Structures are given as structure tokens and as C-alpha cells.
Image (cartoon, helix red, strand yellow):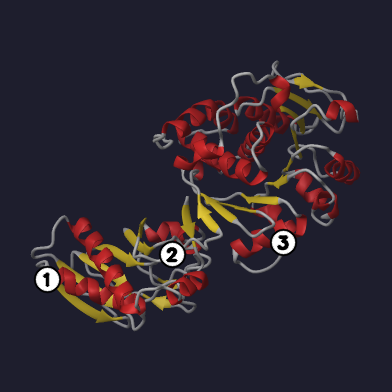
Amino acid sequence: MIPVLSPEEMASVDASAAESVDTLIARAGFAVSRTARSMLGGLYGKRIAVIAGRGNNGADGRVAARLLSRGGARVVVHDSDVETLAPVDLVIDAAFGTGLSRNYVAPRLVGVPKVLAVDVPSGIAGTTGERLGSPLKADRTVTFEALKPGHLLGDGPDWCGDVEVASIGLDVSCASMDLLELIDFDELVPPQARDTHKWRSAVLAIAGSAAMPGAGRLVCSATLRAGAGYVARVGLDGVRDECLLDECVQLGEVPDPPTLRRFASAVIGPGLGLDPSTSEKVRGLCAQLPMPLVVDADALHHLAEVPGSVTVRTEPTVMTPHAGEFSTLYSGSSDLVAAVRSVASTFEAVVLLKGSTTLIGEPSGRVRFVDSGDQRLATAGTGDVLSGVISALLARGLGAFDAAGAGAMVHGLAGRLCSAEGLIASDVAEALPRAFDEARRVAPEQP
């Protein structure tokens, strides 16, 4: 996991550092110069423009400028208000850092030089990734000790380029946010026990209806392929789905309490519909189901104004809204981290906000980011696949926070393993076994 700190948290870490500000700036400037050298493939005779503001970000840029000049590059340092840059091979953007809250207009470039941003491209908000004005689009960004939310959210991923986290000796153990990497997967998802059997990881899927049978099929298909030993599907309208996978059991109604207790987890919501007559059933089930539960899709709409249906639960709950569904649960600032934390606290549940970068928050305030997916997952039905994956991981014994994070990672990887053209949700479900295998292949070697 890579630690993630807000700009305010990073400023606090800087202020409490054992080393002097000058020492930290020297280390940061060296890291910038090292990356610049790598981008240029050498320094002798190369032309570099450094845009340096008045703060520590600019100081990092000036240190880098001196080191690069000693290495043989022709370096010119400009103030942050420069309007046009002469032709160069590389621009180092050290005008403003993550704390900028006003618009910034970058200078006009002549030609197409490479751009290296220090900490964050000037004009990209460190908290939200929002574009403020007209920044320079970086080929690479060097940040220090921890990522910032702005690298991962909003416009940030498109404008930061490849982000390198350089260590300069700061203690970031206080971080309550992390970016999950595939290398973390093996730690989060241990292999199934040799003596496991179907009821140890049985999942009840309350999903699908006569009007939307596909959602239930996708959930069940994904749940099986993510390692559930037994999957039973039931629709609240009582209609059977004759096209459901043969490996899934079809139930006419929600089982009685003794049978329910045999299921290790449940998922509710996809394809149930928004009819008001369904609301009471959904709320009652969410409150009463005696196992870890994934709440997705239509169920989120039925619960939006009734958090008590979730907060009364004694077993873990994972809520998995996309942006539209999230807007029914929260109306507030554009700070997605704060928003996810707020909803997790209100519903006393793990909340997974789906997006190009997925955010996962729990009531304690911890947050994880997952960026393993891409635009291929912006396809109808892929969210149903994700809820199935998470329900399977819950059934296999993972905690809610870990199941949501690992589920988002392997779901994103499954999307990447599919063809970019003509992708449909069932392709993602079918790719899940390969994604699990691929995730385990990048696990670190044990000592």
C-alpha cells in the first residue's frame, strides 16, 4: 500500500519533521533532478526551464536547477508569473504545490517539451484533483513520501502523468489513507483452505426481477467465479429466471431464519427495481439478514433516507454506489474523501464509491483508493459483477474493508484482461478467474 495524505496532513508532517526545512528541500530538489536526468537520458547540452514559485515548491525547483546546471544542462529559472517559455527540452513546473486554491495560468510553451511537475502540476487541487485554471499537463510528477488525493481523483490522473513517490525522510505512519496495489492482494485474500466445502462460502443473492433478469445473472456468475462455493438467487417479485446458470440454485422466496444462517454472506439490490412496494421488503431484509451483506444498485435507493435499516445490523455491511447512486446518499462538497467518510459514518458501513479511481471508506475514517480499472468498466452491468465479487470475498471470510478493496482490485484487473472493444459485463465476470490468478502472480516472494 502507498500512503496517501491530504495537503493539510502533509503540512503537519513537514512541520513535525526532525530535519530542518533546508535539509528536506535539498533532498526534494535532488529527487527532482534525478527524475529530470532520467527523463532526458542525460544532461549535457540539454535545455531546461524551471518555473519556481515563492514557497517550498519553488525552493525544490531551484535546488534541482542548480544540480542540473552542474551536470551540464543549460538551465533558466523563471518566476511563477512567466507568460512564455523559450524552446526547451524539459520544463520543471515548481510554481505552486498542493495547497493552491486559486486559478493558475501556465506559460505558453514553444514546441513540445517534456514536463516534470514537482509535487503536483500547478493548478491541480491537491485535495480533489480539480483543475484550477490552465495547468501544464505533466509527463511525470515527483511527489514526496506520500501520494495526495489530487493525484488520484478528478483531473489529477490525466494531468499528473506517471507519479513517482520519492522518500525524503519524513514519517508518514500517521496516514489514514492508502492506495492499494496488486502486490497487496495476497495479503488481503489468503488462499482457500484445503478442506473447504460449499457451505463455508455460500452466498445468497437477492437480485434480478422479471423486468431486469440480467442483473441477477451477472451477480450470480461473478460470485461463483470469485470463489463462492454455493450461490442461491431469489427475486423479490417471486419470478424464477429460467436462464440462470445451472450451477446456481433458484429459490422461490427468501429462506427461513434457520436456512439463512447457513449462508456466509448475501448481496441485495441489482435488478430489484425501484417500485415503492419493494422498499419495505428491502429495508426489512437489510435490517434482519444475519450475515455480512453487500448493498448495491436499487437497494441503495430504497435505503437512502432510512439509514437505520443498515445501522441496526450487527454484521458488516458494504455499500457500493456509483456516482448517481451516491448522490442520493450524500449532498455536500466536491471533496470525495470527505463525502465517503461522511456516508460511511452515517450508515455505519463500508462505502465503496465506484469511479475511474474507486474510493473505499469505513466508519473509523480510514480510506483506500483503487485504480486498477479503466474506462472499459464504464459499461452497464459491471457494477453488478463487482457486488458479486465482494459478496464472494465476504463469504470466504474477509473483513468488509478488505473484501471491498480486494474486490475492486481484482474487478479492475478483470476489466483490463478483456478486449477494449465491445466489452460487456459478462466478459468481465468470465475473466475473474484469470484476474485472481494474475493478482496472485504479482504477490511478493516470501522470505
Mark 2 burial class by Cα count in 10 Å: few <14, some 14-19, many 20+: some
Residue 65, given in percent of the width and then of the height, sits at 20, 73
Secondary structure under tag 3 reads loop
Labelled disc at residue 330: 3
Q: Position of residue 81 (x, y in %)?
A: 32, 83
Q: Closer to the camera, 118 or 420?
A: 118
Whole-angstrom CA distance, mark 3 to mark 2, is 34 Å
Q: Nearer the viewer, residue 404 or 372?
A: 404
Disc 2 from disc 1: Cα separation: 31 Å
Indicate whether 296 appears above or below 92.
above
Disc ID at residue 171: 2
Q: Secondary structure at mark 1?
A: helix
Label 1 packing within 10 angstroms: few (<14), some (14-19), many (20+): few
Dot 2 amino acid type:
Asp
- Sequence order check: which comes first, mark 3 or mark 2? 2
The image's mark for residue 57 is none
| Amino acid at pointer 3 | Tyr
Q: Vertical placement of 176 versus 69: above or below?
A: above
Q: Secondary structure at mark 2?
A: loop
Residue, disc 1: 70
Instruction: Give yes or no for contact between labels 2 and 1 (Cβ–Cβ under 8 Å).
Output: no
Dot placed on the residue nearer the N-terminal end, 2 or 1? 1
Q: What residue lies at 44% left-to-right and 60% top-to-bottom?
A: 147
